[in-house]
């Protein structure tokens, strides 16, 4: 499952990076210490970003700056206040640093990879995230401004952070394999001009600013018994499971 967040401000992105994305507490099950992160994207490669994600490179990109030189590539937009039609004071958002695209593995995948210790399943999750981000990058567009339509660029920079722990509930941290991919709000046109992205990596905006959620389902060949079972109403908690794992069912 993929969930794309609302736009993050530069301050929010840097705070999440420091307190959550690289926190060793997010890898309780594998005990791998601080999370280094990993770069992906054509723009990241163009900036010569590879391997671990440094705090300095992350901070500069979140502010629309070149990660190597610090040059301002996209214009910063300061926050300001205004009164709407009802007389209420509205505060606009500062520069949109990017979006947090969270890829969450099904529970059976998390348990097999983390509790069962099967690194093949964990690597399969990583490959799925890489492939999904490649597809998202294809839809990247540059915001030209005015009455000009957005221009396709198929180029972005993303910082990935793999976690194996869900948020603790009553002190218990459940195994939950997921990857945060911070997709920065910067892209490059064919003429070399850097601009803000025109959309959240190709996802359509939903009413109220809610993120679009994607469910990826394979099309396996089922037995007659399985096909009969699948005709019955299924609960909303159903997810793709590994062979041998039962489907999640609603109580009763």
Image (tube, rainbow, N blue to C red):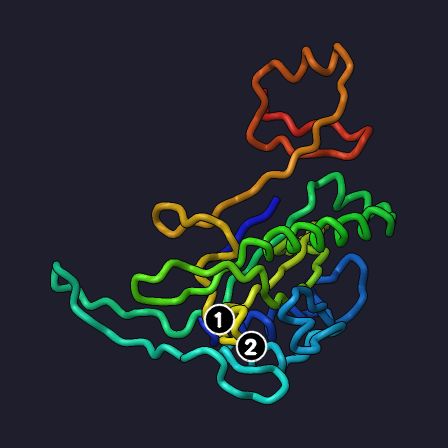
Compared to residue 217, the image places residue 120 above or below, namely: below
Residue 73, above or below 29: below
Tell me whether the residue at label 2 lies in contact with that at label 1, contact meaning CB atoms closer than 8 angstroms: yes
Q: Nearer the viewer, residue 57 or 15?
A: 57
The alpha-carbon separation of the residues under discs 2 and 1 comes to 8 Å
Task: State left or right for residue 194 relative to residue 32.
Answer: left
Q: Secondary structure at mark 2?
A: helix
Sequence order check: which comes first, mark 2 or mark 1?
2
Residue depicted at 59% across the width and 54% down the height: 138
Residue in the image at 66% along x and 29% along y: 248
Residue 182: image x %, image y %?
Answer: 58, 64
Could you say which disc has been placed on residue 250 in the image? none
- Look at the picture and state if 134 lies above or below 12: above
Crowd rating for badge 2 (residues with CA inside 10 Å; few <14, some 14–19, many 20+)? many
The tag on residue 97 is: 1
Q: Is residue 205 left or right of residue 182?
A: left
Judge from the rendering whether residue 6 lies leftward or rightward of residue 123; answer left or right.
Answer: left
Q: Residue at x 66, y 34 (%)?
A: 217
Label 1 crowd bin: few (<14), some (14–19), many (20+), radius 10 Å:
many
Q: Which residue is mark 2?
A: 61
Q: Specify the quadrant of the image occupied by residue 116.
A: top right
- x, y (%) of residue 43? 62, 70
Q: In the rendered view of the protein, which quadrant contains the N terminus? A: top right
């Amino acid at each position: 499952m993929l969930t794309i967040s609302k736009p993050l401000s530069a301050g929010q992105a840097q705070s999440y990076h420091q307190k959550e994305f690289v926190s060793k507490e997010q890898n309780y099950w594998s005990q791998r210490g601080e999370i280094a992160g990993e770069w992906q994207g054509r723009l990241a490669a163009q900036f010569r970003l590879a391997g671990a994600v440094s705090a300095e490179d992350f901070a500069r990109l979140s502010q629309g700056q070149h990660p190597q030189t610090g040059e301002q590539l996209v214009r910063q937009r300061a926050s300001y206040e205004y009164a709407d039609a009802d007389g209420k004071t509205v505060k606009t958002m500062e520069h949109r640093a990017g979006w947090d695209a969270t890829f969450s593995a099904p529970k059976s995948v998390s348990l097999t990879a983390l509790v069962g210790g099967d690194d093949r399943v964990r690597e399969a999750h990583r490959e799925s995230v890489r492939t999904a981000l490649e597809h998202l990058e294809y839809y990247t567009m540059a915001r030209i401004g005015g009455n000009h339509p957005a221009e396709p660029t198929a180029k972005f920079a993303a910082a990935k952070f793999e976690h194996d722990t869900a948020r603790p509930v009553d002190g218990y941290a459940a195994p939950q394999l997921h990857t945060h991919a911070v997709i920065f709000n910067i892209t490059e046109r064919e003429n070399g001009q850097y601009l803000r992205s025109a959309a959240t990596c190709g996802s359509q905006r939903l009413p109220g600013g809610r993120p679009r959620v994607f469910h990826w389902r394979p099309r396996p060949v089922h037995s007659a018994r399985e096909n009969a079972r699948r005709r019955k109403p299924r609960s909303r908690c159903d997810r793709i499971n590994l062979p041998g794992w039962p489907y999640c069912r609603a109580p009763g």
